[in-house]
Amino acid sequence: MTGKAWGGVFDQATDRRVEEFTESVSFDRRLYAQDIDGSIAHAQMLAKVGLLTDDECARIVQALGEIRQEIEQGRFRFTSELEDIHMHVERALIDRLGDVGRKLHTGRSRNDQVATDLRLWVRTAIDTIDRRLEDLQRAFVGRCDADFDVILPGYTHLQRAQPVLAPHYWLAYCEKFERDRGRLRDCRRRANVSSLGAAALAGTSLPIDRHDVALRLGFDAVAANSLDVSSDRDFALEFAFDLAMIAEHLSTWAEEWILWSTVEFGFLRLPQAFCTGSSIMPQKVNPDVLELIRGKTARVIGNLQSLLVLIKGLPLAYNRDFQEDKPPLFDSFDTVQASLALAAPLVAGAELNRQAIAARLDQGHLDATTLMEHLIRRGVPQRTAHGIVGRLVRRALDRGVRLADLAIDEFRAECPELNHEVYQVLGVEQAVRAMQSYGSTAPDRVRKEIDRWKERFKGR
Ligand code: ARG
């Protein structure tokens, strides 16, 4: 039982099937860098408080560096016998240094070690996703000037509602991803707390310095309660939620662009490098990337569900169940990262089909609400104005024309307060220009918003 971290109390060797069933190294080897960084900081702290000599510490740090290299160069041998990444690194250290290596695990346990590794990993993962989100925001902002003159139908219930500027659409997505970034920042604060030194669950009788290790690892704080922190995976679940929310936003965008790129809509041409064809229908150019971004959202949501159920009802403190937290978390990260990496070039490379959009803007009476507001400005109560415009739309529908095509007599028949000025708010261009409220699609407001986003990304 040479490879095991326990053994003293056992008089049977571990069943091979148990080793296979309980191992985590097949997936937690991904934490090797965090594990080694944590061990280096821990060794340096042990030397500082006199639990290791400076020479012992130097040899440990040196050996850990070599082990890192071996792993990175693919020369390191992983085996399920050694269970997890922590045991692998420690065993390799002991193979090199003998008794000096046997001192590293002083004042810590795998329970606080794995929590620390995961916190370090989440911290970096958050920064990666945040950068990807910014790339995507930049791709949307990058389109705004060129698309400024394009008016699109805005929808509610997927029925034509009111006209909006194309950049108003692009910046709507920027806002959603901005909230996602805010959630990540928030999650990072709670993740960036050191669990190291909680030891198994109760702390340790050895004179360790938890604040020193925390500082070395760039943690902002030290967790105040050893029982709490060794059983805390809140930060991992929060991150999984943040990733699920990003996937939700991506799937909304993907769905919208899938619709827009159909012949039926015809608003958008996707870059062909980001589409795939059909093996049987030669004419097809399919939006598979967008469909998969939408589709992969399912597993990201599923992973969050798995994690929520995983920790439900676990008594304090560490339980082996926690080991199951990594596969869903890693998968959510990989999936969202890959989706974001494709979303940015897709956004940048798509082209609005101006003619098709313009040809369709006259349908659907997108200016009806602006007309109603025109009546309100003339003193007609909103409910009454709504009824009048409804009847005017009815007339237009019956004759198959736009509101702007109705004669002034027809307007006055429904509402004597109206005069020729009514034509100044009809048609999508004028309807958009008539907007004024903060946050609306009014062109000067949208212009200010574009400038605000550009300013934000300037020089970065
Ligand atoms: N591999 C475990 C995990 O990922 C860490 C080891 C803790 N094991 C234990 N028997 N206390 O959670």
Image: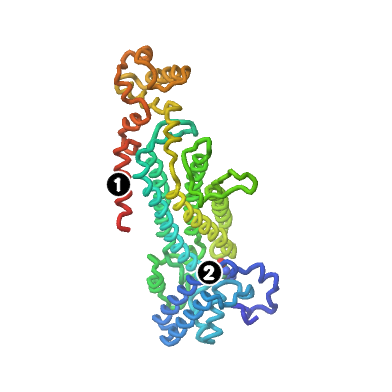
Quadrant (top left, top right, bottom left, bottom right) of the C terminus: bottom left
Nearest to N terminus: mark 2 or mark 1: 2
Q: Is residue 125 left or right of residue 424?
A: right
- Tell which of 362 and 290 is nearer to you: 362
Q: Is residue 251 above or below residue 435?
A: below
Residue at disc 1, secondary structure: helix
Q: Is residue 166 left or right of residue 458?
A: right
In this picture the colour scheme is rainbow
Residue drawn at x 48%, y 17% is 398
Residue for badge 2: 111
**Cβ of mark 2 under 8 A from ligand 1:** yes
Q: Which residue is mark 1?
A: 451
Question: Residue 413, which numbered label?
Answer: none
Q: Quadrant of ligand 1?
A: bottom right
Which sits in the foreground, 53 or 280? 280
Q: What x and y, as percent, mark residue 187?
A: 43, 57
Q: Is residue 100 visible?
A: yes
Occupied quadrant, residue 56 = bottom left
| Secondary structure found at label 2 | helix
Which quadrant of the figure has residue 46? bottom left
> Which residue is at a point 62% across and 75% down the rendered structure image?
79
The answer for how far apart the CA atoms under marks 2 and 1 are is: 49 Å
Mark 2 touches mark 1? (CB < 8 Å): no
Q: Position of residue 1 (x, y in %)?
A: 65, 80
Is residue 297 in view?
Answer: no
Q: In the rendered structure, which amino acid carries the disc numbered 1? A: Asp
Mark closer to the observer (2, 1): 1
Q: Nearer the viewer, residue 296 or 302?
A: 296
Q: Is residue 166 above or below residue 212?
A: above
